[in-house]
């Protein structure tokens, strides 16, 4: 099964006034496979639930994306199977830093993406939360 990515684009063309470089698309079509629904990932360790010791949006986003990658690997997939992300940030001024960092992990993947600026997340020190959906292809005999 191959994911069909409809109307691929890069944010450097869509938002030329911002220093972004994310590979996204308008829609993803999947067929068959296993769907993985990820809980919103925050900048905390998956094993200990300890928040990382940083109030930097870049470092927090790295941890969030590392968690997403780890969970997809544990489910038998990889980042290339990601079809949708929803990005929650608490300050619009962090948008470029968060999206640039996220873009490092989704280069060439082209998931659909929704971004929201929210008043707060579950813990006041969290600046970013990202949830995702992935579809892992069925293994062929």
Image (tube, rainbow, N blue to C red):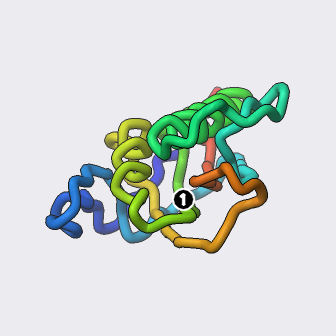
Image vertical order of residue 115 relative to residue 95, above or below? below
Determine which residue is flagged by label 1. Answer: 84
Seen at 43% across and 50% down, the residue is: 98
Is 109 placed left or right of 1 in the picture?
A: left
Q: Quadrant of residue 130?
A: bottom right
- Residue 132: x and y in percent read 62, 54
Q: Nearer the viewer, residue 23 or 104?
A: 104
Q: Badge 1, how many Cα within 10 Å: few under 14, some, many 20+?
A: many
Tell me if residue 87 can be seen.
yes
Disc tally is 1
Is 16 drawn above or below residue 40 in the view shown?
Answer: below
> Residue drawn at (40%, 42%), measured in percent from left and top?
101
Relative to the observer, which residue lies in front, 116 or 76?
A: 116
Tell me: 8 left or right of 136.
Answer: left
| Residue beneath the point at 34% across and 47% down | 100
34 left or right of 127 in image: right
Q: Residue at x 47, y 47 (%)?
A: 2
Residue 87: give x, y in percent of width and height.
54, 60
Q: Position of residue 71 (x, y in %)?
A: 70, 34
Residue in the foreground of this view, choosing between 129 and 6 = 129
On the picture, is 139 further left or further right than 108?
right
| Badge 1 element | strand
Question: Can residue 35 be seen in the rendering of this structure?
Answer: no
């Amino acid at each position: 099964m191959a994911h069909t990515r409809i109307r691929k684009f890069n944010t450097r063309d869509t938002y030329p006034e911002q220093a972004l470089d994310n590979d996204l698309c308008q829609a993803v079509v999947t067929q068959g496979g296993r769907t993985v629904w990820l809980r919103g990932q925050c900048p905390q360790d998956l094993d200990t639930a300890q928040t990382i010791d940083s109030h930097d949006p870049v470092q927090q986003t790295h941890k969030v994306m590392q968690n997403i990658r780890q969970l997809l690997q544990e489910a038998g997939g990889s980042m290339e199977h990601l079809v949708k992300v929803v990005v929650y940030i608490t300050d619009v001024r962090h948008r470029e830093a968060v999206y640039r960092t996220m873009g490092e992990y989704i280069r060439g993947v082209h998931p659909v993406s929704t971004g929201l600026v929210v008043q707060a997340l579950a813990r006041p020190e969290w600046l970013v939360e990202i949830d995702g959906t992935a579809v892992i292809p069925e293994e062929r005999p």
